[in-house]
Amino acid sequence: MLDPDDPETWGGEEGDECYADKEVLNEDGVWTCHHDAEAGRDACIFHLPVTEKDGEAVVDAFLTALDDAATGEDPETKERKLQFLGSRFGEFDLTDTLPEVVEGQIDVDLTHSEIEGILDWSDSIFTTARLRLQALRCAKSASFESVKFGGDVDFTNAEFSGDVDFSDVEFSEDAIFWDTEFGGDINFRCVEGAEFGGAANFRAVKVSGFADFFNTTFDGDADFWAVEVQGDSNFREVDFRGDATFWEAEFRGDINLTNARFDRGASFENANFYEDVEFWMTEFAEEVEFRGSEFDGDPNFSQADFGGTAYFQNIMLAGGRFEKTNLTEADFTGANLTDTDFESALLSRATLFGADLRGAKLDGAVLGDIRVDEDTRFLGHSDDDSDFSPHRFSTIRSKPCCVYDPDYEADNEHADVDKAKSVYRALEELGGKHARPRLQARSFVRRQDLQKQNYWDNATADDASLEERFIAGVRWSRAKVARVTLLYGESPWRVIAWSLGIIFSFALLYPLGEWMKPADSDPITYAQIASNPTEILDLFYYSTLIYTALGFGDFNPVGLGRLLTTIETGLGAVMLALLVFILGRRAAR
């Protein structure tokens, strides 16, 4: 009845693989049916065309064979009676049979069988050692609701054209769905406690519709390597007690793993997620791999708990959500984390080498002991790379902000001054700890700018008292001067520029009223400079001496020049002291 080398005998085509177990083949390498042929026919009731037999009679014959095998004493007879390779069924309904259809440690083999009608085994109990359903072809819907499989079940290369219901199913041993195709929805939803007692193998499975595993328990390893789901996937409250593997899986619809638990290792390496991904409140007890995964939607890991290391290296997580997530020792090396929400996340000992966190929401996140390098980016817009290199004029002019800063963008929906100050403060400490003076300085300046703006808002508030306005105005003025002259103590170049400006300005003032003269000559005037331009050098020389408090040299102030000299000397002392302070502060970093 079945020759592995002749695809016509098992419904295959040239090049297809035959899944008949070699142990059932005879010495000629073929399988022969051990059931009696129908009267006047050369085939048994199981192998006659569906149109030439009664569907109920076929099911009755199947149950009779199971009963005979369970009660028979001859092991060889048991084995032969339970071989149904290449059988043909119309409607295959076992729901009206006794709850326990098979007893004893025996194998049932339906490899390469075809079911043209509805398959319904609901509430049945199979205590077989192994149920072989390899290369099964089911043309319509199938139901395994509340079925209890006592031994291994093998659906390798099976094909279901319609929806398949496995709700509340129990697999006591291994369940193998390798390379199985589901043309509709699959439902493994657990309501009363169904579970996979052994390993669950869904490798290379293809699902055209919705895949529902709600509340399912996987006691053994769960293998979803290269699985492809066209519709949405539901893994809410699933309990993975063994290793869970989703390598190279493709989820083209939304996937929901809310409240799922991974008690051992989990791997989503090179998986592709084409829509939204929900890992809300998911628990990972050990390490989990996301290296090479692609998220086209916005992944949600909110309140997830990564008990082991989570590997997110070099992947796109832009717009993702990690608020209140435990990311201790997570590895985000080279990851794109722009516009990602890390509010109140625990990033203790996380690695962020080369990660891009521009636009990320970091309020309340624990950042103190994360690991960063010069390529880790925190400030600025995700679509603006003008300040990526520090050796550009655009970088010098840029004022990158965090996402909470009112100046981040027009109509900033995330604007919150208090949150912005908090984030800038955290980044200051981070920059100081990791020798990132550029990050430290930028964060400090932006925090001071926000404080200055707060003074201005208080000084111009309609409901503020005159006293409050006055004090706030004084503080704003002081902050404004500090920013313009020395960038709140961050820029020695501003102090140098202002010093040069003061020196040149005072040098040009002295000739106006003949307020400075050489010791043995008349006061210098602009008329003298016009006739002898080199005298302007004497003015700059005198102004420099006065500014640096080195003395008068060969010159003397005259009249109002004494007051100007005193003022310039005072300004010089203050500015030079500030310059020493700034240089010392930067050197200490």
Image (cartoon, grey):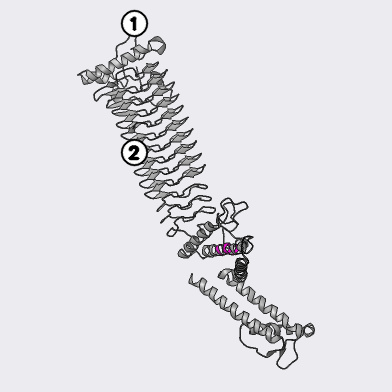
Question: In which quadrant of the rendered view does residue 259 lie?
Answer: top left
Q: Secondary structure at mark 1?
A: loop
Query: Front-most of 249 and 126?
Result: 126
Residue kind at label 2, given as amino acid type:
Asp
Residue found 75% across the figure and 83% down from its top:
511
Q: Position of residue 198 (x, y in %)?
A: 31, 34
Residue found 40% across the figure and 28% down from its top:
157
Task: Establish if 179 lies above or below 467.
Answer: above
Task: Establish if 521 lies above or below 278.
Answer: below
Q: Position of residue 138 (x, y in %)?
A: 41, 22
Distance CA(mark 1)–CA(mark 2): 50 Å
Q: Residue furthest top?
A: 40
- Residue 2 relative to residue 390: left or right: left
Q: Position of residue 526 (x, y in %)?
A: 78, 83
The segment highlighted magenta reads: 447-453
Number of disc labels: 2
Identify the residue under disc 1.
40
Which part of the image, by quadrant, shows the N terminus? top left
Query: Front-most of 301 and 222?
Result: 301
